[in-house]
Image: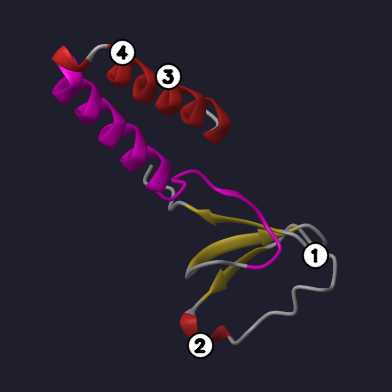
Amino acid sequence: MTITLLDRCMRYIGTSIAYSPNDSDEKFALLEALRNEIAKPEQAPAWHDAPTCEGWWMNSVSYCRTFISENSGRLNVNTGIRWYGPIPEDKT
């Protein structure tokens, strides 16, 4: 679900509260749930200009898996290299 769709849902609920305040508690709870869903960080790996956290990452040049730690230092984000991750551990 994209943010624009969530925004549209939130506007719809807000408008319906204005026209029908009788069940507003339930609608406010739904609005709060939508806000919390939007605020959640992405759980799936995605492409980034640079690694955003510690973990296993793959870059768009070598496609090699690289462990990025807090001590790895700052990576240059202006190189055109894209990073995919963080890649979850294989638990099989």
Q: Residues within 10 Å of mark 2 (few under 14, many from 20)?
A: few
In the structure shown, which secondary structural element does the residue marked by tag 4 occupy?
helix
Q: Nearer the viewer, mark 1 or mark 4?
A: 4
Using the image, determine if residue 73 lies above or below residue 60: below
- Quick one: label 1 or label 3, which is nearer the N terminus? 3
Marks 4 and 2, how far apart at CA: 55 Å
Residue behind mark 3? 12
Above or below: residue 2 compared with residue 21: below
Per the rendering, the mark at residue 22 is none
Earlier residue among tags 1 and 4:
4
Amino acid type indicated by mark 4: Tyr
Query: Which numbered disc flags the more N-terminal residue, 3 or 2?
Result: 3
In front of the other: 26 or 59? 26
Residue denoted by label 4: 19
Label 1 SS? loop
Q: Earlier in the sequence, mark 4 or mark 3?
A: 3
Residue 18: x, y in percent?
31, 20
Region in magenta: 23-50
User: Closest to the observer: 79 or 41?
Assistant: 41
Q: Residue visible at 83% across and 61% down?
A: 61
**Mark 1 — residue?**
81
